[in-house]
Image: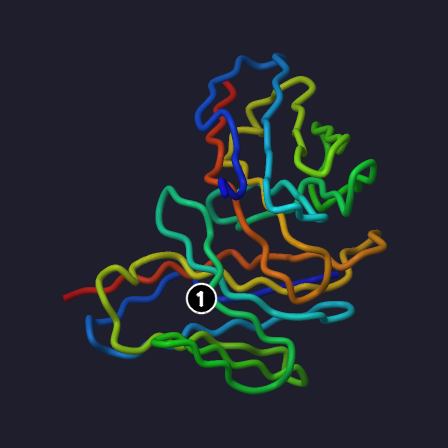
Amino acid sequence: GQNIDQPTEMTATEGAIVQINCTYQTSGFNGLFWYQQHAGEAPTFLSYNVLDGLEEKGRFSSFLSRSKGYSYLLLKELQMKDSASYLCAVRGLLPGAGSYQLTFGKGTKLSVIP
Amino acid sequence: NAGVTQTPKFQVLKTGQSMTLQCAQDMNHEYMSWYRQDPGMGLRLIHYSVGAGITDQGEVPNGYNVSRSTTEDFPLRLLSAAPSQTSVYFCASSYAGAGNTIYFGEGSWLTVV
């Protein structure tokens, strides 16, 4: 089966840096995604990691360690518009299924304060 | 391109009624799926399809049916609505292959009373 853990809520100050952690257990790991979801909206893609290491994309970076079952999303120079939920999702073999599927964590609600 | 289009955006049903949530994508994606999102539960996979004519169950399939007669469309049917099916439903699609990004529709807010 698959199990994904991430903190429920975090608060950070505008202009600061915040790191959102995600730990996972899965059968047949085949990639990890981070999505951003503003309240009342659909999730939107932020990043993808399949190999160990850091992927940087502007103010956002994502890190993966497959041996530790661990990833983090790093947000720099926080802006008020970054207040949203951040979803960690792992692609792995769904129990009973014959294909790889994306399983989501419960999300981390980030509040950016002035 | 419209991307992934879901209808209706909001719906109120009475217990026992049936309805269909429509989903269409214009990106020629092979893979389509339905998720439901509940407070404190995250997104959970209901059903998915890897191509026209092929569907399979996800994590929480009970009470739902799907079909995939064309590449573009992937409707979700609630056979006999129950209050436990009150949720936000997201349709998603992507190209086949591990690293391809999944794109989500705007969501359908369903309330069963």
State the image coordinates of residue B90 (x, y, percent, origin top left).
54, 40
Left or right for A29, reference B106: right
Q: Which of A20 and B66 is in front in this view?
A: B66
Above-or-below relation of B38 to B102: above
> For this view, does A43 lie left or right of residue B30?
left
The part of the image, by quadrant, that contains residue A85 is bottom left
Residue at image coords 73%, 31%: B66
Task: Give the vertical position of A109 relative to B75 (above or below).
Answer: below
User: In percent of the image, x 37 and y 42: which residue is there?
Assistant: A40
In the picture of the structure, the residue carrying the numbered disc 1 is A7
**Residue A80 on image: x %, y %:** 22, 62
User: Is A91 left or right of A22, judged from the image as shown?
Assistant: right
| Above or below, A99 relative to B22 | below
- The spot of residue A49 in percent (x, y) is 59, 75
Residue at 34% in and 57% down: A84
Few, some or many C-alpha atoms within 10 Å of disc 1 (few <14, some 14-19, many ≥20)?
some
Query: Would you identify the image quadrant in which residue A36 lies?
Result: bottom left
Q: Toward the viewer: B83 or A15? A: A15
Circle 1: element type = loop
Note whether B19 is above or below B35 in the view shown. above
Q: Residue furthest front?
A: B1
Residue A31 image position (x, y, % from top left): 65, 70
Number of numbered discs overlaid on the protein picture: 1
Q: Mark 1 lies on which chain?
A: A
Is residue B53 shown left or right of residue B20? right
